[in-house]
Image (cartoon, rainbow, N blue to C red):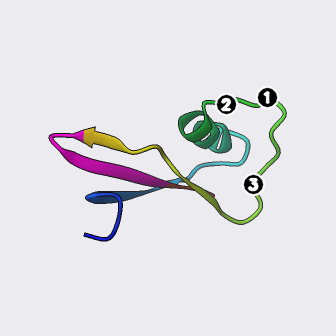
């Protein structure tokens, strides 16, 4: 396999504006939390750190709406 993972999960964060979707994404992917974050315009995404379980590499691509 040419990819650096065995499984890729795509996760979409949905909800009302201002509820913390962007901060969930930042906390999970960069271990950061910003009380002053602005509303997302459009869509942003990040790939979380790889997790290895049962010898399989798992990645999550998280989309922030």
The residue wearing badge 3 is 40
For the point 59% across and 58% down, the residue is 45
Vertical placement of residue 59 versus 53, above or below: below
Taking depth in this image into account, of 65 and 53 the one nearest to the observer is 53
Residue 4 vs residue 36, the one in the foreground: 4
Which residue does the image show at 84% across and 33% down from the upper left? 36
Q: Earlier in the sequence, mark 2 or mark 3?
A: 2
The crowding category of the residue bearing disc 2, from other C-alpha atoms within 10 Å (few below 14, some 14 to 19, many at least 20), is few
Q: Would you place residue 65 above or below residue 32 in this image?
A: below
Q: Cα distance, mark 1 to mark 2?
A: 10 Å
User: In whole angstroms, how far apart are the C-alphas of marks 2 and 3?
Assistant: 16 Å
Quadrant of the rendered structure where residue 46 is? bottom right
Residue at the image point whose x is 65% and y is 48% from the top: 16
* Above or below 47: residue 33: above
Asked if residue 58 lies in the magenta stretch, the reply is yes
Left or right: 13 as drawn, with respect to 21: left
Mark linked to residue 35: 1
Outermost residue, bottom direction?
2
Q: Quadrant of the C terminus?
A: bottom right
Left or right of 9 on screen, residue 22? right
Q: In the rendered structure, which segment of residues is drawn in magenta?
A: 53-61
Task: Decide: few, some or many residues near mark 1? Use Cα within 10 Å; few <14, some 14-19, many ≥20.
Answer: few
Q: Say which element carries label 3.
A: loop
- Using residue 24 as the reference point, say whether residue 4 is left or right of it: left
Main structural element of the magenta stretch: helix, strand or loop? strand
Q: Give percent across and percent down for residue 49.
A: 46, 43
Q: Quadrant of the N terminus?
A: bottom left
């Amino acid at each position: 396999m040419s990819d650096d993972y065995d499984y890729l999960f795509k996760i979409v964060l949905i909800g009302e504006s201002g509820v913390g979707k962007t901060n969930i994404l930042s906390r999970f992917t960069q271990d950061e939390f910003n009380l002053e974050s602005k509303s997302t315009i459009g869509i942003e995404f990040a790939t979380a750190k790889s997790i290895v379980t049962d010898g399989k590499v798992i990645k999550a691509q998280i989309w922030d709406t």
